[in-house]
Image (cartoon, rainbow, N blue to C red):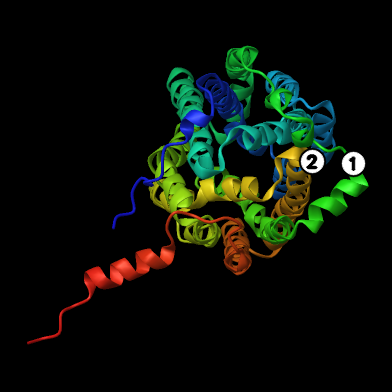
Amino acid sequence: MTIDTPTEPDMSNSIKKKEERALYSRTIATSTSRGLVQPFVSMIAITMGASAGILGWIQSISNLLSTFLGPIFGRLSDMAKRRIPFVVISTLTWGIPYVILYWIIDPWVIVLIVALVNLLASLGIPAFTALQNELFPGEVRAKLTGRIFWFDAIGSAVATIITGIILTIVFNDKGFEIEQRAEIYQRFILIPIAIGVLISIVGILPFRKIEEPLRNKSLGEQPITHSLKESFKITFSNKPFAKFTLISMIHAIFFSFSWPLFSIFQVSILEVNALQIAILSISFSVMTILVIRFGAKLSDRFGRTKLIAFNRLALALFPFAYIFASKIWHLYIIHFTLAGVIFIGSPSIQAYLLDIVPPREGGVYFGIHSMLVGIFMFLGSLAGGYLTEMFDKWYPLLTAVKITLGIAAGGRLLTGLLFLTLKEVKKFPSSWGEVKKHLQKRFKLEPPV
């Protein structure tokens, strides 16, 4: 017995090639355009003198407004019985507000820019997820979801190479003090933004050749539209959905708690430059590309819940490892090795959510889940930023950051344990119990003669 590609028939042909092309094209376009700008938003803020509290607001408002109106936008796509217009409009417009970065002098304005960016992005998030739910066959749901992650990682890697490595070589910011870097990045920020908008336009062109999947559905398969209040009641009467959402909300506090701290640690403590940030980001993308398909195969063959719990528990290692880092090469090792461990379980999270959400109300389900988790991410990032500011009044910055990272690691570990209580909602070709028995039999020592 081996843990390899599942032996069940390949169901990938159940989704048309032109539909796959549209989904993957949009994914790589969005991740590329996002990666051209986003990794350096916090860096620009820090070089402008942003405090840990402001960084907390930047991350928190991103979490909140990328999800807060999700139920409304998701319900609108259900009512319109169309997903594609929401996806296309969002893809074309979300990055445009970054243009304002060229003129700002106050880091608080970055909070407003990020708010508008994520509000526009949220327009298409529930519709895009609902579209996947309608197109992906259940037998290979993690496999196809894994491909979405894979193309997202490809786009992020390409963008980071362009923004981090090429711009660093061309503009050579190594000789500048940290206070001067913001001016350099602002001066040339319109270049990656323009490239990102152009890539987004190209990325959504394949949607012209596909039809709304709901058009070919019978009346009994069409989305059901309820009032928003009724939708909340209906979604939470779905027990697997309610449990998964509640656990995700609790975990989201500590999942996002350490996000502002990573930027502070990298820029203010280790004083990394754009090239080094690019390497850190690329290491994540490389490991995603290497392991995500394997994780997806495991998920479709053996089940989702064990891999979800593994992913959530492994996330505790990341802030914990940062506590002991003192050189940039320590971060390279942390990002590269831990990313491989964490991303094994990533496809299972989205696939499990697709398993428990009825396609007829996909838009509002995904919107409600995203909104509630986003609210708690908002609170978590804000708490992490301001708690670090409070500790910074009593201790040196390095000590303050390490204390808060310790809190984040402990919180991720404790709340990650909650995912062990999840139950599978469908059957899979094999079980983890079979793997355990096989390993026990294979490595069992023969008794001495």
Amino acid carrying label 1: it is: His
The residue under the point 70% across, 20% down is 88
The residue under the point 44% across, 43% down is 292
* Of the image marks 1 and 2, the number of the one nearer the N terminus: 1
Image position of 424 with respect to 286: above or below? below
Q: Tell me the SS state at disc 1.
A: loop
Residue 71 percent location from the top left of the image: 82, 40
Residue 248 percent location from the top left of the image: 68, 57
In the image, farthest residue toward the bottom: 449
Asked whether 409 or 76 is in front, the reply is 76
Specify whether 106 is left or right of 401. right
Specify whether 431 is left or right of 375. left
Please indicate, yes or no, whether residue 339 appears anywhere in the rendered image.
no
Please indicate, yes or no, whether residue 300 appears anywhere in the rendered image.
yes
In the picture, the quarter occupied by the N terminus is bottom left
Q: Nearer the viewer, mark 1 or mark 2?
A: 1
Q: CA distance from mark 1 to mark 2?
A: 9 Å
The residue under the point 71% across, 61% down is 243
The residue under the point 57% across, 23% down is 19
Specify whether 9 is left or right of 107. left
Near mark 2 (Cα within 10 A), the count class, few <14, some 14-19 or many ≥20, is many
Give the residue at mark 1.
Answer: 226
In the image, farthest residue toward the left: 449
Amino acid carrying label 2: it is: Val
Q: Which mark is residue 364?
A: 2
Image position of 435 with respect to 386: above or below? below
